[in-house]
Amino acid sequence: MSSSQIPTELSYGSGGHSGNSATSTTPAASVASTLSPIAILTPTSASTLYASPDSANQPFFGAKSEPEDGDGLSSGGSVTAAPSYAEPAKKKQKRNKPTLSCYECVERKTKCDRGRPHCLACIKRQTECKYAHVANLLEETSRSATNGRRMTKPPKKKVTMSGMKPTIPSIADRGILTGRIASPSNVFGVGSEHPFANYWTCEGGLPEVIGVLPDKLQADILLNQYYECVDPVYPMIDRHTFYLEYEHFWSLRDSEKTDAAFVGLLFIMMALGTQFVSTTNPKDRKQTSEFYASAGNQALRMSSYLNTASLRSVQAMVLVGYFLINDHHASDGWAFSGLLLRQAYAMGLHRDPNIVIPNGSDFEKQQRRKLWQAVLVQDTFLTVLLSLPPNATHTDVKVDDFADDSAGFGDSSPTDIAYIRGSWMLANLVQETISSPRSLDVPICSTQRQKSKLVADFRAVYRSFPDVFRSWDQDSIAQLACTNKRIVRQTLFLSSNYYHNLMLVHASESPDVPVNVRATLEAAHEAITSFFVLFTLFDAEARVWWVFHHRAFLEALCIGSVLREAGRDPATADQFLRDPLFARAKADITRMVQIMKIIGDGDQGSEDARTRVAVLGEFL
């Protein structure tokens, strides 16, 4: 492929390199496709919400219930002595049914899949899993009939007296008016173009891909943009070791550049870096980034990445997923993540490196743990956004083994280590307690006690975050952005993820567990504020990160659903008008609409943003 077939290259500031203009004679080279935007995922299919760390037990528009002590008596109530003629209390009869769940799940009152030798919940919690002797006997006798893990069972279909289907078990997922709810077809982009345009010939092979590399100066600029904007959020590729390999790559003759997996990774990193370049118009930026992504995909094909997986090819696949999502191909990103999970399992990344590579170096083991964390985090939080089942569910890699860089290998800072560990622990908890139930429209919590326990678990994870990720406000983080933008990006992403999922817990309801309205609004406010701060400090980046502004959109939908139901209920109408919390919630929706109007303004504005404005406008 000649250089004349390459789309117009970008100019990156005064020091950038300006490429040749496109004079392609082939249809593919002149493509500057404007892909049909992903339809807005409304909460029935894709919403996720945050709840606040406060007021965990407050019922829907009701007074806060008093906690019970061990005997079921109110801690603040008094007990009147029974009259002398009263019959003695009957002794509580013990259950005859044997306990089949493991001791740890029984103690925590969490759902146990009763897997052997360890249940999935204990694997994720990294706790010891033991069963009663009678439970093991029963399991042995029934194993032939029930070979394999038990599945989460969806609720039985019920019909109300009016003949209508029951409500979705979370106010966060009810979203907007029924007529506007997205169907599976438009959610998953049926009719969209293939994400990787075909610029390649059958005989060109890897040399054809290498032949379209930009010059080293331009590649340096794009990689610097990647490590500035993408790596803080997903610190997966060790910068020091990558640049050693990168410099060696440029020192080779073209005939010696045979590592197709590394070439694929290099192109995908440049594609992501291009997405965050702000010195060009959106059309050129989109065309060039998609061209680099296509080159990266072609290089991976040349490496036969589906049957010869390597750390570099899996790293590239993780980044391909994020590129597709940012490029408004969320459905393609979801499908591609399935391939990624299979490859990660095939490589044994889900296994403890001390088992898989006992003789490997500490650095190699650390890199495998870091890569598995990246796969797990992408899978977990994408399933939360799309309300689909998680896939990265089987692992014995321990978070605690991902330690500080005491041996001096790599360039991970202590803050990066803490950020990775925090995201990892949060993903484990979310996958275990939120992702699977929501994918089947099962209530997240079936009892108030379970809900309180889950909120406490989320708070425990939050307390494990370093102070720099927790003790911030808009003024302090604006000052920090002047000296350490990396920590600011990590703080905002981690806070957004945490509060969004806490909101989902508070917003969930069941026949015995009402929505905690105040806690839902508090958490949604904290979550959406993270996006507002990101847009204020890093306007251009906030426009690119689809996961961030889509999460904020879902949070605004949740707030709108709460306000709408509050306004309809006569018992809460006065509170709705007078309560400052509700006024702030409405202001959050208004601010989100203002930002979406900015993003969607102009001929090259985002169609997604304009659709979101129309949807959220219904709540105002």
Image (tube, rainbow, N blue to C red):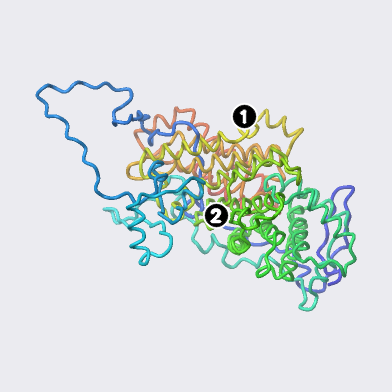
Distance in Å between CA atoms under marks 1 and 2: 32 Å
Is 434 or 188 nearer to us in this picture?
434
Q: Is residue 349 left or right of residue 27?
A: left
Q: Is residue 169 at least partly visible in the picture?
A: no
Residue at position x 76%, y 33% from top?
482
Residue 195, horizontal then vertical, whole percent: 67, 65
Q: Which residue is mark 2?
A: 395
Indicate whether 70 appears above or below 428.
Answer: above
Q: How crowded is the residue under tag 1: few (<14 C-alpha within 10 Å), some, or many (20+)?
A: few
Q: Earlier in the sequence, mark 1 or mark 2?
A: 2
Residue at position x 41%, y 41% from top?
108
Going by the numbered disc 2, the residue's amino acid type is Thr
Would you say the residues marked 1 and 2 are in contact, meaning their CB atoms lie under 8 Å apart? no
Residue 214, horizontal then vertical, whole percent: 85, 60
Number of disc labels: 2
Residue 141, horizontal then vertical, whole percent: 33, 62
Residue 494, horizontal then vertical, whole percent: 61, 41
Is 381 or 332 nearer to us in this picture?
381
Q: Which element carries disc 1, helix, strand or loop?
A: loop
Q: Which mark is residue 244?
A: none
Q: Which element carries disc 2, helix, strand or loop?
A: loop
Q: Which quadrant of the figure contains the N terminus?
A: bottom right
Going by the numbered disc 1, the residue's amino acid type is Ser
Q: Residue furthest bottom?
A: 203
Is 619 or 303 nearer to us in this picture?
303
Q: Which residue is mark 1?
A: 471
Q: How crowded is the residue under tag 2: few (<14 C-alpha within 10 Å), some, or many (20+)?
A: some
Q: Nearer the viewer, mark 1 or mark 2?
A: 2
